[in-house]
Image: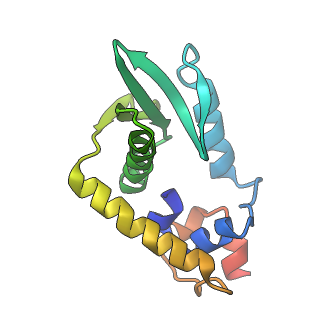
């Protein structure tokens, strides 16, 4: 979901099991922020094909959280959490979502509503279409390119 809102070429690369450059500094920094933030919480909770950064109970409510180093990609991060909530709902689990930005000391509550479900369904259709293509979409410069862990696949 994250890649679909950032770059369709990344969607194709991921769908074809082409991993990003693991030495990318921002990828490493993001993992470090995830690993060192909220140490009392359980991290990397697997649910089907999904991996929640944090899942916890707030009373009777399941809360699924995604940790991000900044709000720079707020839309992509929001869609990722909505995707998690949608996947849980399909299995009969109603949950609440949140985005955590520890370096900014900020927390955003995420709600899955009917409009969000419609948007997700449209994105899923796009993801399936792109993944089925024999070759990746041509590279297009966007705001994510500068720090992208896939930049070598596009610009070398």
The answer to which of 134 and 19 lies nearer the viewer is 134
The quarter in which the C terminus is drawn is bottom right
Q: Going 35% across and 33% down the picture, which residue do you hit?
A: 94
Camera sees residue 127: yes
Q: Position of residue 56 (x, y in %)?
A: 46, 20
On screen, 86 above or below 134? above
Q: What's the coloring here?
A: rainbow
Quick check: 92 above or below 139? Answer: above
Which residue does the image show at 75% across and 66% down from the upper left?
18
**Total numbered labels placed on residues in the image:** 0
Residue lying at the far front in this picture: please name it.
92
Left or right: residue 135 versus residue 118 is right
Tell me, yes or no, if residue 143 can be seen here: no
Q: Position of residue 129 (x, y in %)?
A: 52, 79
Which residue is rendered at x = 60% and y = 75% of the image? Answer: 131
State whether residue 22 is above or below residue 81: below
Q: Is residue 56 left or right of residue 146?
A: left
- In the image, residue 65 lies at what x, y percent? 45, 33
Closer to us: 16 or 145: 16
The x, y position of residue 80, in whole percent, is 45, 50
Q: Nearer the viewer, residue 125 or 37?
A: 125
**Residue located at (39% from left, 46% from top):** 86
Indicate the quadrant where residue 28 lies: top right
């Amino acid at each position: 979901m994250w890649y679909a809102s950032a770059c369709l070429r990344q969607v194709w690369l991921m769908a074809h099991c082409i991993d990003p450059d693991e030495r990318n500094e921002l990828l490493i920094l993001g993992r470090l922020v995830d690993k060192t933030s909220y140490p009392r919480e359980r991290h990397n909770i697997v649910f089907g094909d999904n991996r929640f950064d944090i899942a916890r109970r707030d009373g009777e409510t399941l809360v699924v959280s995604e940790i991000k180093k900044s709000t720079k990609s707020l839309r992509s991060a929001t869609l990722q959490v909505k995707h998690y909530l949608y996947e849980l709902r399909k299995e009969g689990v109603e949950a609440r979502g949140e985005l955590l930005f520890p370096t900014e000391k900020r927390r955003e509550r995420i709600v899955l509503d009917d409009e969000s479900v419609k948007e997700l369904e449209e994105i899923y259709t796009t993801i399936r279409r792109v993944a089925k293509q024999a070759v990746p979409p041509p590279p297009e410069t966007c705001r994510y390119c500068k720090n992208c862990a896939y930049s070598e696949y596009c610009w070398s």
